[in-house]
């Protein structure tokens, strides 16, 4: 951390082994805190090469590991809205997915090192452990609008599956049941709570994670068309989808 400002005024901050201590105004109200920082990420954002040697980046914050790369109060009980602005090169087809709605994407240069800026906005308050990005060479398959069976909101969410290019022929694989699973929860519990629903094949510490509006699941979730649809993978897909409500 090189600098901290509170309401645009630079302040002296302290550090422990896992937190940053920032002096706040005595009066109650809203303040704007800006933290300027840089360095290699040790946890929270998993950076690694995939099986084809391509660099990938996946958020993996559960339960309080957001602090390793996002300045935040990352206790699971604390919630906030989040807006992402992410700049990356489109080298090898790298794209960005994050929480909430895709607001825009635009290029700022051309050529092999061309940079594209993506902006996402999650308008519902969520805990930091659900605030994630995926930056990787992924392709997507549209699963369409899920019909929720509610008279006032029949089409409640659009679903997409994002996978490595080599997995295209396997799609939709175990995600073929995702629309029915969402319909079940939407009619049993409540309408789907977020702006979109992405299923992202990833490489993280755990087998799956229920990040808000974008579930992240292990490579092993997808199976060849000739293979029987494995119960374990079906269970994982439905488990992470249930977490969108809970």
Image (cartoon, rainbow, N blue to C red):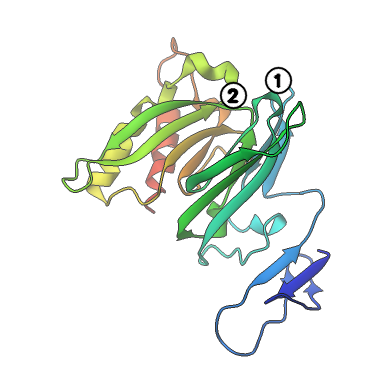
- Residue 207 x %, y %: 55, 37
Residue 38 tag number: none
Pointers 2 and 1 in contact (C-beta within 8 Å): yes
Looking at this view, name the residue that lies furthest to the top.
226
- Residue 244 x %, y %: 40, 48
Residue 164 tag number: 2
- Where's the C terminus, which quadrant? bottom left
Q: Secondary structure at mark 1?
A: loop
Residue 52 tag number: 1
Question: Of 105 and 56, which appears nearest the observer?
Answer: 105
Ranked by sequence position, the earlier of labels 2 and 1 is 1
Q: Secondary structure at mark 2?
A: loop
Q: Residues within 10 Å of mark 1 (few under 14, many from 20)?
A: few
Question: Of 148 and 225, which appears nearest the observer?
Answer: 148
Q: Residues within 10 Å of mark 2 (few under 14, many from 20)?
A: some
* Residue 42 in the image: above or below residue 148: below
Q: Residue at x 73, y 35 (%)?
A: 109
When asked about the image quadrant of residue 83, the answer is bottom right
Q: Residue at x 41, y 16 (%)?
A: 228
Residue 203 can be seen, yes or no: no
- Residue 84 x %, y %: 59, 51
Q: Residue at x 35, y 30 (%)?
A: 144
């Amino acid at each position: 951390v090189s600098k901290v400002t509170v309401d645009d005024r630079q302040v002296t901050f302290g550090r422990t082994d896992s937190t940053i201590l920032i002096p706040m105004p005595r009066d109650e109200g809203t303040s704007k805190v800006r933290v300027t920082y840089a360095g290699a990420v040790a946890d929270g954002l998993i950076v690694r090469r995939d099986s084809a040697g391509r660099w990938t980046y996946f958020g993996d914050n559960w339960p309080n590991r957001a602090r390793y790369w996002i300045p935040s109060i990352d206790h699971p009980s604390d919630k906030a809205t989040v807006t992402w602005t992410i700049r990356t090169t489109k080298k090898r087809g790298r794209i960005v997915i994050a929480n909430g709605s895709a607001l825009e994407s635009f290029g700022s240069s051309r050529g092999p090192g061309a940079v594209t800026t993506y902006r996402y906005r999650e308008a519902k308050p969520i805990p930091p452990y659900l605030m994630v990005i995926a930056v990787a060479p992924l392709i997507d398959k549209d699963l369409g609008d899920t019909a929720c069976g509610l008279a006032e909101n029949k089409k409640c969410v659009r679903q997409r599956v994002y996978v490595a290019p080599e997995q295209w022929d396997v799609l939709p694989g175990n995600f073929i049941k995702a629309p029915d699973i969402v319909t079940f929860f939407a009619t049993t519990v409540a309408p789907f709570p977020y702006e979109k629903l992405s299923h992202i094949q990833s490489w993280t510490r755990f087998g799956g994670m229920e990040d808000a509006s974008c579930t992240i699941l292990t490579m092993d979730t997808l199976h060849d068309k000739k293979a029987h649809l494995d119960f374990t993978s079906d269970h994982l897909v439905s488990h992470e989808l249930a977490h969108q409500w809970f």
